[in-house]
Image (cartoon, coloured by chain):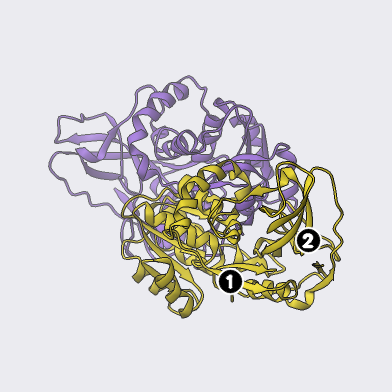
Chain colours: A purple, B yellow
Amino acid sequence: MHAVALKRFPVGVPCAEDFVIVANDVPSGDAGARLRVRYLSLDPYLRGVMSGRHMGHSMALGDVVPGGGVAEVIDSTTPEFVRGEFVQGETGWREEAFLPADRLRKLPPDVPPSTALGVLGMPGLTAFAGVRDILQPREGETVVVSAALGPVGSTAAQLAQRAGARVVGIAGGAKKCAMALKFLGYDACVDYHRDDFGPALQLACPNRIDCYFDNVGGRVLETVLQHLNLRARVVLCGLMDQYNKSERPPGPNLGPVIAARATLTGLVVYDHFARLPAMLDELVPLVRSGRLKYLEDVAYGIQATPDAFARLMRGENIGKAIVAL
Amino acid sequence: MHAVALKRFPVGVPCAEDFVIVANDVPSGDAGARLRVRYLSLDPYLRGVMSGRHMGHSMALGDVVPGGGVAEVIDSTTPEFVRGEFVQGETGWREEAFLPADRLRKLPPDVPPSTALGVLGMPGLTAFAGVRDILQPREGETVVVSAALGPVGSTAAQLAQRAGARVVGIAGGAKKCAMALKFLGYDACVDYHRDDFGPALQLACPNRIDCYFDNVGGRVLETVLQHLNLRARVVLCGLMDQYNKSERPPGPNLGPVIAARATLTGLVVYDHFARLPAMLDELVPLVRSGRLKYLEDVAYGIQATPDAFARLMRGENIGKAIVAL
């Protein structure tokens, strides 16, 4: 049994050599479950944890990398969970784990277990809180979503579309944009790598932008702000543009926010755990019936984890990055 | 009779030589009033108008500078206004003007007429909308206000204080800070010129910052964002920091906004004209009884207008900048 530990603090974009595969010692405990991890979740926020910049976590060299996982119960010392059952919890990047019962979540039946890390997990809840509770798009409005193929963006986009909005994605590269249209139902998708990104975004949003779900910050955010409608709403949810930078870069000029009388709201999913039941009530049936789409970028085996994380941080993944063990 | 026209487009901070005193030709019209202007309003937004950057106005060389004024009716062709009455309207920087009746506003009785340009005018309405409708400070919260002695900031601060908040001003220089405490009742005031502005602000806000009324942008905004409480509210209302710059500088890194789950809202007073009666109902009695304080920076005579505007744009004014004619 193996785990993935931090070998050195990444400088810039992480590479596989920043990590090391180590033996996975799993202590047992009371009132919990011994778990065989089936899927690991790779998430951009972990880059901040590795730099000591994250609000809730930090880590030392040699620590096993934290993160969510979906696991099968192989032994249980609590009546709540039985052998063979699938659960979700903060396993970290390891093949086996032990977690107390109060830190495990049962999975909804009849959906692929890996969805508990994406569309039906924290990313899905992030999208649900951002769209339903903050942006509240109305029929006919234009909603723009960056990181359009990721689990937050793709779920946010479909929730906005279900509310009657026209949804425009932003993604890196023509291939991703084509996939956004074909597999996720975006009304349009704009490639931010293009030199004419600003004009292309303007063309894709002829009625300007009423809502923006920002997962990236940087030049993309700055460009979107220049095309806001009056009283536009913006959710600030991620800063992929700066996670790999050692200095915190300046942000966008805020003149356009004043001119548009816009509202920018910071979103951290931790505040919205109380909405999880409502989110699952609504989204599980949609996933089960195929009406809510999602993309997964699957790597295989614990050894593939460091490279898969590096690909995520280079933006080369397509959909929710997970590792199947 | 004279007026002030734009002689050349200012580069950087405007100077008196950017303007020229010209003869003031006043055409007459139907259903309006011929006005002898008594007070001119000098406002930072005019700098944007002079650069073609303002959303609602622009001007050409040789144009009389626009802006609000308080005037006495010297001749009227409408029954609504009578000779000798004081009115407020967009007179521009001139000694005499003619305005149609529907663009004139009567002044409340028993308050100094010049207040219609500051605490009881657009700046007061800006503060009222920002504090009452957007920030909504609660008892015991910490509210920070920049440009603390200006008509927007000083009114916003007192409205927040009346709601039971602890109010901390930000101003440029020790003299302004002392005046903020002595004449406007701030609980504390921090000088942003100090090298230790960040630590000083932190010291003045031991419970961090719940609401921020931003009139300046730039480094002040960036510093305040680093001391926000969870779910803080920020009104973005002015960008004094950049009005004199030819390029639009970058803004603050928005990571702290996400971390604080804060909300930033752009405020433009034009949206809030419907609140003017409510604002006057509440603030006129407070001004009349001396419970709502305000500072005025008065220059005298039309010839003094260009230099007074330059002083305003250098931040050397103390209180609402007006010219008494």
Q: Quickly name the residue at label 1.
A: B297
Say which chain tag 2 marks.
Answer: B
To which quarter of the image does residue A53 belong?
bottom left
Q: Nearer the viewer, residue B261 or B210?
A: B210
Q: Quickly name the residue at label 2.
A: B96
Where residue A54 sits: x, y (%)? 39, 57
Element class at badge 2? strand
Element class at badge 1? strand
Say which chain tag 1 marks.
Answer: B
Q: How many marks?
A: 2
Q: CA distance from mark 1 to mark 2?
A: 22 Å
Residue B289 visible in the picture: yes
- Is residue A65 toward the left or the right of residue B56 in the image? left
Identify residue type, mark 1.
Answer: Asp
Q: Nearer the viewer, residue A47 or A255?
A: A255
The reply to the same-chain question for discs 1 and 2 is yes
Kindly report which numbered mark, 1 or 2, lies closer to the viewer in this rendering.
Answer: 2
Where residue A318 sits: x, y (%)? 56, 42
Q: Is residue A261 above or below residue B249?
A: above
